[in-house]
Image (spheres, helix red, strand yellow):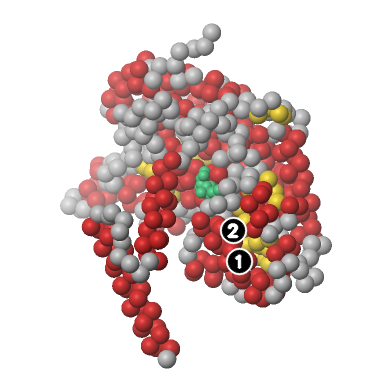
Amino acid sequence: MQKTILSFKERPAWLALNNHVNTIRGQSLSKMFETDPDRAESFTIESGSLYFDFSKNLINQETLGFLVNLAEQSGLAEGINELFSGGLVNKTERRPALHVALRAPKSEQIFVDGTNVVPEVHQVLGQMTAFSNAIRSGDYKGHTGKAIRNIVNIGIGGSELGPVMVYEGLKHYSQNNLTIRFLSSIDGTAFVEATAELNPEETLFIVCSKTFTTLETMSNARAARDWLLSALKDRAAVVKHFVAVSTNTEAASDFGIDSSHVFRFWDWVGGRYSLCSAIGLSTMIAIGPENFNSMLEGFHAVDTHFRTAPLHRNIPVIMGLLTVWYSSFLGAQTSAILPYDSYLKRLPAYLQQLTMESNGKSTTVSGKTVDYKTGPIFWGEPGTDSQHSFFQLLHQGTQIVPCDFIGFAESLNPLGSHHDLLIANMIAQTKALAFGKSKESVLTEGTAPWLAPHLTFEGNRPSSVILMESLTPHALGSLVALYEHSVFTQGWIWEIDSFDQWGVELGKSLATKIIKEIESPETSSFFHDSSTRALVRRYKIAREKNLTDSKRIRS
Ligand code: G6Q
């Protein structure tokens, strides 16, 4: 018999948490650690090489119990099962979200409409492997017979943020006789910079677009084709210098891409969940198929953990529950991601899309407007740089900002005591945030009483630490999968569809109208508010003036 799922605020656990939140508001992390000497141990979960310490969060065992009840009462276990078995978890688009199939081993079976998709996934992985090896070895030649040395990934959003984050994250493993660049924005500057100083004869463009219709990607792909043809002067060159990654194989062929160079993926892979698909082709070329596979294994290890670990010992479930706790009960509006590894500089940007495009929503799957807070703003920068900028607010500001600290036991680039200092800083920050520094101890140090309030840290600021052995492809895969499943957990509990993104449509469709007005010599006939009308007019006047001025300078 199917379990009846109560809506978020009707669940007994919601009520319990709503009462319990005041108890937690009246407690401090210092007290909680003092009264429970085993706190660190009981609020730490290890799985494989992952060490997840969530003891410095504003929770006690009772909170955790209520949060796990909340997950149970939302039917999360059934939700996870649906996710992994190809259920229609993307409810508004009526399709599965089967990114877990992209890293499933050959022996697994996952069905979509009666077809086991795992063999297809491995067939494309095989095609990517052969192609990557040919590029890496120099066997693959461009139109004039030269080996390819430059790769430009053209794609945006989910077709760029994952690949660029992983490329930067795993740069240590990259083949360094290849130049890899990413072109996303419809900004002439981005195009010029992405192609600057590249020899067209040695350049390959990977056009990554699930739909093969995205304005930015298609405009950049056409500009790239013009750039190539103006140098090589032979339309046949397109075949050797362009490959596509898309579900729209027909549009890719119409563009001039040879069907053997179209790497397909599927409707059931969401853009921001696609980095394990052929969208990761640039990554595979950079780091090699073996490392890419190891990354997939890292993802899969966490998939297995998410599917099998009990909810109260399940890292992504706990991460998701903490986000729900801070957003919906404690009123946190943002959450900071603080990787203590320079290679992970693009991780916060990647997680911004993953988390905010997935859970930045205010309508439930049944079409009701929520009356509780859902996805917070995610932001962040690598440590230790960020300590010298926005950490002031984290320590002494008026907002509660739960932080995720991410660090590695081993450096990929050991240098004197750099790494120990780096990690010492990371650990110190979590301690300072949690326990602060009382006014009494500031005064005891001899600080003048007038200055003491400024040097006081109230503490009680929550953070979690994800500590891993070293930044390997496997570790990065595991790390990303943790966040993917945390996002799923949150969305399921909040009853929102974490796999659609209707909120990005309105601006795109208005842009298609505004571009017509910008290009037309006529004054707009389209109805606008006074601000939009004035901006369009001002832009056109300024552009005309600039054009006239530059003509005058040239003549
Ligand atoms: C991600 C979104 C979005 C998408 C881009 C690119 O989940 O759907 O960021 O990835 O708009 O779309 P295409 O891959 O279709 O060009």
Disc 1 element: helix
Residue visible at 35% across and 47% down in the picture: 394
Image side of residue 484 versus residue 540, left or right: right
Do callouts 1 and 2 mark residues in contact (Cβ within 8 Å)? yes
Determine crowd level at label 1: few under 14, some 14-19, many 20+ residues with C-alpha closer than 10 A: many
Residue 462 sits in which quadrant?
top left
- Establish if 425 lies above or below 67: below
Is residue 181 shown to the viewer in this render?
Answer: no
Residue visible at 38% across and 17% down in the picture: 11
Q: Rounded to the nearest whole Å, what is the CA distance between mark 1 and mark 2?
A: 9 Å
Q: Which residue is mark 2?
A: 154
Residue type at mark 2? Ile
Horizontal and vertical percent position of residue 460: 34, 37
Horizontal and vertical percent position of residue 6: 40, 16
Residue visible at 55% across and 44% down in the picture: 271
Is residue 128 shown to the viewer in this render?
Answer: yes
Horizontal and vertical percent position of residue 275: 61, 46
Q: Of residues 308 and 260, which is closer to you in this image?
A: 260
- Establish if 443 lies above or below 549: above
Q: Quadrant of the N terminus?
A: top right
Horizontal and vertical percent position of residue 398: 26, 44
Q: Which residue is mark 1?
A: 224
Residue type at mark 1? Ala
Residue visible at 42% across and 20% down in the picture: 70
Q: Quadrant of the C terminus?
A: bottom left
Residue 207 sits in which quadrant?
bottom right
In this view, the residue farthest toward the left is 450
Determine crowd level at label 2: few under 14, some 14-19, many 20+ residues with C-alpha closer than 10 A: many
